[in-house]
Amino acid sequence: MTSASFPATRLRRTRASAWSRALHRETILTPADLIWPLFVTEGQGVEEPIASLPGVSRWSMDGIAERAKEAVALGIPCLALFPNTQPERRSENGAEALNPDNLMCRAICTIRDACGEDIGILTDVALDPYTTHGQDGLIDDQGYVLNDTTVEVLVGQALNQAEAGADIVAPSDMMDGRIGSIRAALEEANHANVQIMSYAAKYASAFYGPFRDAVGSGGLLKGNKKSYQMDPANSEEALREVAMDIAEGADSVMVKPGLPYLDIVRMVKDRFEVPVFAYQVSGEYAMIEAASAAGAGKREDLVLETLLAFKRAGCSGVLTYHAPLAARLLNG
Ligand code: PBG
């Protein structure tokens, strides 16, 4: 311990004025730390508000292009895309994920046309927006999500997204071995510079509800995802997941949800030399909105404090639906 005892040490000394607090601040949050998740829908001029995510909407292509330009203007470096697939395009095996003209691929092209290389495009690799049962993979007669056959489809989905111009493919499905298979396929298909951000430690969480409404899978899902997403009780297992994904070729790893799992972020950061991201998920966003609507806290302060906490815990960046608000506040 290096501190002298009181009163030689008075920790309040450096806190006494704003300039001194600024000088001693250990962590900074900037718009460049943010990844903005966006929901895509069919049509023209369509904005569909999501009731359980107040302030967040699904956008048709024109709106997606506008949001992308807004992100660039705000200094947000990357968007994460999620499609709300039309019911008639959903199927038992989620084949729409492989359609080169699906919502996701069109959104990628739309953003590229609008913003060129000024923004990164991260795409979700998992089948839940495309299946009639809302699971992230292929299921057997008992409804069990099959690992190896699902990985084959995920590889096709990731290649489809890379062909359309995705910069980062982000597998959120939690199948074993998918990172290695996707990495090998990307190399083979001359997509050596497409990054993989692995949802390495993704927990079977109660905080995903509003997201499932947003992509339209919530009403379809029977049961839960506990046979592939992690048990919230476990942390050693998260380190094993991260170690495997790094070994298989992930460029960065993600912990999800965010705030309730900052201990996992810190453990991963201390253990591995790898960029770590966290997803402040839909239920966390909704909690902040509900708290501020109820007068239990000021939205702006809650948002900036929670996002700063991710940086302090060791995150390189955060996926958050509050990205545009936070960037606006940070830009003054
Ligand atoms: C599904 C997926 C989920 C989220 C991102 N990708 C939900 C789930 O696993 O059921 C959740 C994001 C959020 O809640 O904001 N592959």
Image (cartoon, rainbow, N blue to C red):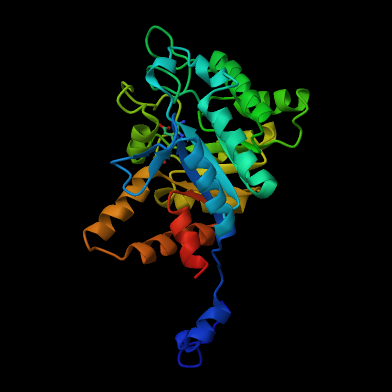
Based on the displayed image, in which of its 4 quarters is residue 39 positioned? top left
For image coordinates 53% across by 23% down, the residue present is: 102
Can residue 237 be seen at all in this image of the molecule?
no
The image shows residue 201 at horizontal and vertical percentages of: 51, 39
- Seen from this angle, which residue lies furthest left? 294
In the rendered image, the vertical position of residue 136 relative to residue 47, given as above or below: above
Can residue 313 be seen at all in this image of the molecule?
yes
- Numbered marks: total: 0
- Seen from this angle, which residue lies furthest front? 45
Based on the displayed image, in which of its 4 quarters is residue 49 positioned? top left
**Is 30 or 144 nearer to us in this picture?**
30
**Is 228 or 49 nearer to us in this picture?**
49
The quarter of the picture showing ligand 1: top left
- Seen from this angle, which residue lies furthest bottom? 7
- Seen from this angle, which residue lies furthest top? 141
For image coordinates 70% across by 35% down, the residue present is: 194
In the rendered image, the vertical position of residue 227 relative to residue 254, given as above or below: above
The image shows residue 212 at horizontal and vertical percentages of: 36, 32
In the rendered image, the vertical position of residue 332 relative to residue 15, given as above or below: above
The image shows residue 94 at horizontal and vertical percentages of: 48, 16
The image shows residue 180 at horizontal and vertical percentages of: 67, 27
In the rendered image, the vertical position of residue 129 relative to residue 27, given as above or below: above
Based on the displayed image, in which of its 4 quarters is residue 45 positioned? top left
For image coordinates 48% across by 63% down, the residue present is: 328
Considering the image in quadrants, where does the N terminus appear?
bottom right
